[in-house]
Amino acid sequence: RPGSTWTTFGELFSAFYGWAAPRGKPLIIAETGVQEDPADPARKAAWFADATSWIRSHTAIRAVSYFDGVSPKGYDFRVDTSGASFAAWQAMGLG
C-alpha cells in the first residue's frame, strides 16, 4: 500500500517456511499480492521474477494463491496492471 516498505516474496515468507518446512507437510501460501511502484515501473515485474525463483528453490511449497483484485481500500493487486507485470506473471509458469 502507499507509504509502506517494499518487501520481497522471500522476506514475506522465509520465517513461515523456516517454521513449517521441517514438519514435512506440503505448504500452501494462502494469499499474497503486489502493487505497482509508481517510482519504479519495473519493480512489480521484478517482484514476480524474484518470487518465482524463491518458490522454485523452496520445494516444500506446493501452492500459492495470488490476490488478483482490488482491495476494499482500492489497492490494485491485479497481475495485469502493466504489460511488464503481466508478462512476468505469465513467465512464472507455476500452474
Image (spheres, rainbow, N blue to C red):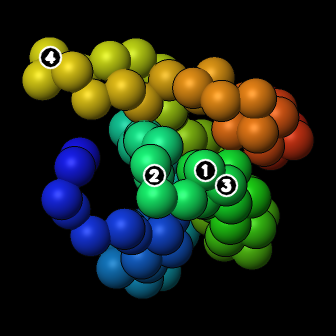
Q: For the residues labelled 4 and 1, say whether their Cβ atoms are less than 8 Å apart.
A: no
Mark 2, residues whose alpha carbon is within 10 Å: few (<14), some, or many (≥20)? few
Q: Is residue 64 visible?
A: yes
Q: Residue at x 76, y 39 (%)?
A: 84
| SS assignment at label 4 | loop
- Quick check: 55 above or below 30? below
- Sooner in the amino-acid sequence: mark 4 or mark 1: 1
Q: CA distance from mark 3 to mark 1?
A: 4 Å
Q: Residue at x 76, y 67 (%)?
A: 53
Q: For the residues labelled 2 and 1, say whether their Cβ atoms are less than 8 Å apart.
A: yes
Question: What label sits on residue 37 in the rendered view?
Answer: 2
Residue type pointed to by label 3: Ala
Q: Image check: 2 left or right of 62?
A: left
| SS assignment at label 3 | loop
Question: What label sits on residue 72 in the rendered view?
Answer: 4
- Give residue 70's quadrant in the image: top left
Q: Quadrant of the C terminus?
A: top right
Question: What label sits on residue 41 in the rendered view?
Answer: 1
Q: CA distance from mark 2 to mark 1?
A: 6 Å
Q: For the residues labelled 3 and 1, say whether their Cβ atoms are less than 8 Å apart.
A: yes
Mark 1, residues whose alpha carbon is within 10 Å: few (<14), some, or many (≥20)? few
Q: CA distance from mark 4 to mark 3?
A: 25 Å
Residue type pointed to by label 1: Pro
Q: Residue at x 65, y 30 (%)?
A: 82
